[in-house]
Image (cartoon, rainbow, N blue to C red):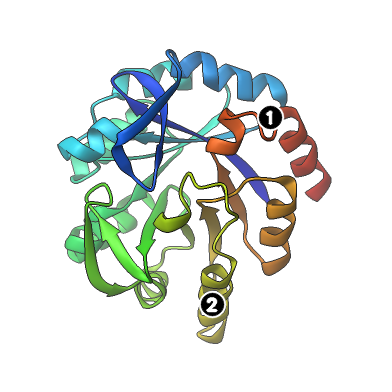
């Protein structure tokens, strides 16, 4: 199982939110590139970058920073936030991202989402399924739809997506453990349909023990943000844990 540190960017700085609240942003590092280099030095191999300015604006804002991280590290970057058009995805990949998340777009424009999936393929496009009380949330978590998160994910797995990042918004930044029940149900339902799912858990991961639990239920990755930035766990320990899974 992959351990994936997260960097959220607002105003060119590395921040973390609680439950998606932009008014509760806490700056952890003035320079996201420096933060990324620390993760790489510790032995981690991948980085989840969210352009929160882009999520709010509806188009990428921090492309320059993403490009700098890609140029100055060997980290595998997966990027989300404000990706609403084919041109946005081209820009993100041209900036050096290896993968990009289809979030709000997937909930609002299925035709374009499927066209992008055909263009870029399931190894580069990740389905983002942000969940509030079991329903898909969009537009930087400011709107909750009537779409059941689990059904939504399975429908898109049928279209050819294989990798899903699922964030339980209630858990985000709360350090209370991940949403194990949601992930277990999602994996079980996908399996019942014979669908392949690489599920990346996001939200609430606070310890190595949480990673053990996620690994046990079959998640393929876990995103960790606040616990890492608050030094509840350190990057080197996460890298060691990841290496033991290989």
Q: Quadrant of residue 65?
A: top left
Residue bearing the label numbered 1: 235
Q: Is residue 194 above or below residue 241?
A: below
Horizontal side of residue 207 vs 103, given as left or right: right
Compare residues 95 and 164 and report the one nearer the observer: 164
Which residue is situated farthest in the bottom direction here?
192
Horizontal side of residue 188 vs 149, given as left or right: right
**Residue 163 picture location, percent across and down:** 49, 58
Q: Earlier in the sequence, mark 2 or mark 1?
A: 2
In the rendering, which numbered label is found on residue 68? none
Residue 163 appears in view: yes
Which residue is situated farthest in the right direction here?
244
Q: Residue at x 55, y 86 (%)?
A: 192
Residue 167 appears in view: no
**Residue 2 picture location, percent across and down:** 65, 47
In the rendering, which numbered label is found on residue 185? 2
Horizontal side of residue 120 vs 171, given as left or right: left
Q: Residue at x 60, y 37 (%)?
A: 227
């Amino acid at each position: 199982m992959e351990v994936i540190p997260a960097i959220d960017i607002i105003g060119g700085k590395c921040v973390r939110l609680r439950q998606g609240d932009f008014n509760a942003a806490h700056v952890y590092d003035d320079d996201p590139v420096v933060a990324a280099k620390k993760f790489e030095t510790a032995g981690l191999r991948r980085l989840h970058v969210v352009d929160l300015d882009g999520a709010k604006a509806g188009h990428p804002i921090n492309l320059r920073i993403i490009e700098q991280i890609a140029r100055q590290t060997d980290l595998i970057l997966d990027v989300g936030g404000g990706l609403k058009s084919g041109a946005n995805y081209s820009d993100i990949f041209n900036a050096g991202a290896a993968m990009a998340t289809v979030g709000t777009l997937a909930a609002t424009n299925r035709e374009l989402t499927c066209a992008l999936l055909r263009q870029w393929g399931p190894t580069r496009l990740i389905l983002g399924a942000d969940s509030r009380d079991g329903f898909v949330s969009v537009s930087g978590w400011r709107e909750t739809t009537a779409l059941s998160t689990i059904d939504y994910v399975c429908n898109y797995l049928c279209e050819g997506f294989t990798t899903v990042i699922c964030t339980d918004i209630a858990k985000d930044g709360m350090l209370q453990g991940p949403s194990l029940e949601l992930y277990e149900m999602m994996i079980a339902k996908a399996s019942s349909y014979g669908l392949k799912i690489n599920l990346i858990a996001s939200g609430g991961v606070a310890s190595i023990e949480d990673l053990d639990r996620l690994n046990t239920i079959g998640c393929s990755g876990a995103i960790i943000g606040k616990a890492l930035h608050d030094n509840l766990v350190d990057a080197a320990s996460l890298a060691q844990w990841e290496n033991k899974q290989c």
